[in-house]
Image: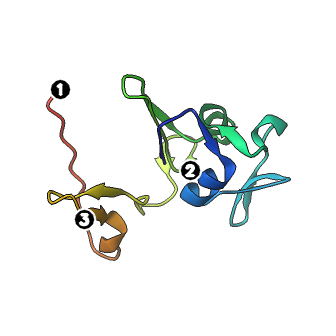
Amino acid sequence: MLLTSETTSRAEFEHRSGWVMKPEGACKGDVCIPLPDELKGDTVNARALAEAMGLPLAEEPDFGLLAIGPETVGSRALTSAQAPELELPDVNGNLFKLSSLRGQKIIVYAWAPY
C-alpha cells in the first residue's frame, strides 16, 4: 500500500489493505491483531499502524512516500506468493493492473539508474 502522507483514513486503509478495523483490532479472515486505542479512529498514522501490526514499512522521504507491506511471518517472509495489487501507467499512459495477469507466471523487474 503506497501512501503520500503519514496519515490515511481508516476507510482507505481497509479498502487498500484488506484489513478491517473492528473493536478487537485489525482483522483479516480469522486473524485479528489488537491495536492501541489511538489507532482505532477515522484517521490513522501509517507508521504507528505498521509498527503495531508488525507490517514492513518502506519510506522515501525525498518524495514523501511511504509503503506499508503485506503481512509477514516473523517480519522475514511473506505469508503467500500472491503479489499485492499494483497499478501503473504503461508506455502509452494507460493504467495497467498487475492483477490482470492473475493465474499466469510473471517476473516483475524493477530498474533505476541511480
Badge 3 element: loop
In the rendered image, the residue lying farthest to the front is 93
**Which amino acid, by three-letter code, is at mark 1?**
Tyr
Structural distance between the alpha carbons of marks 1 and 2: 29 Å
Q: CA distance from mark 1 to mark 3?
A: 25 Å
- In the rendered image of this protein, does residue 32 appear above or below residue 34? below
Near mark 2 (Cα within 10 A), the count class, few <14, some 14-19 or many ≥20, is some
Mark 1–mark 2 CB contact (< 8 Å): no
Decide which of tag 1 and tag 2 comes sooner along the chain.
Answer: 2
Q: Nearer the viewer, residue 46 or 93?
A: 93
Residue shown at 43% from the left, 58% from the top: 84
Residue at position x 66%, y 55% from top?
A: 11
Please tell me which of labels 1 and 3 falls first in the chain: 3
* Amino acid identity at mark 3: Ile
Q: Amino acid at mark 2?
A: Glu
The circle on residue 106 is 3
- The vertical placement of 112 against 80, above or below, is above
Left/right of residue 45 with respect to residue 22 in the rendered view? left
Name the mark nearer the viewer: 1 or 3: 1
Vertical comparison of 60 with 1: above or below: above
In this orientation, which residue lies closer to the viewer: 76 or 22?
Answer: 22
Residue that numbered label 1 is attached to: 114
What quarter of the picture does the C terminus occupy?
top left
Q: Position of residue 57 (x, y in %)?
A: 51, 35
Q: Which residue is mark 2?
A: 71
Identity of the residue furthest to the top in this view: 62
Q: Residue furthest bottom?
A: 103
Tell whether label 3 touches label 2 (CB within 8 Å).
Answer: no
The residue positioned 74% from the left and 46% from the top of the image is 42
Mark 2 or mark 3, which has the lower sequence index?
Answer: 2
- Looking at the rendered structure, the secondary structure element under dot 1 is loop
Helix, strand or loop at mark 2: loop
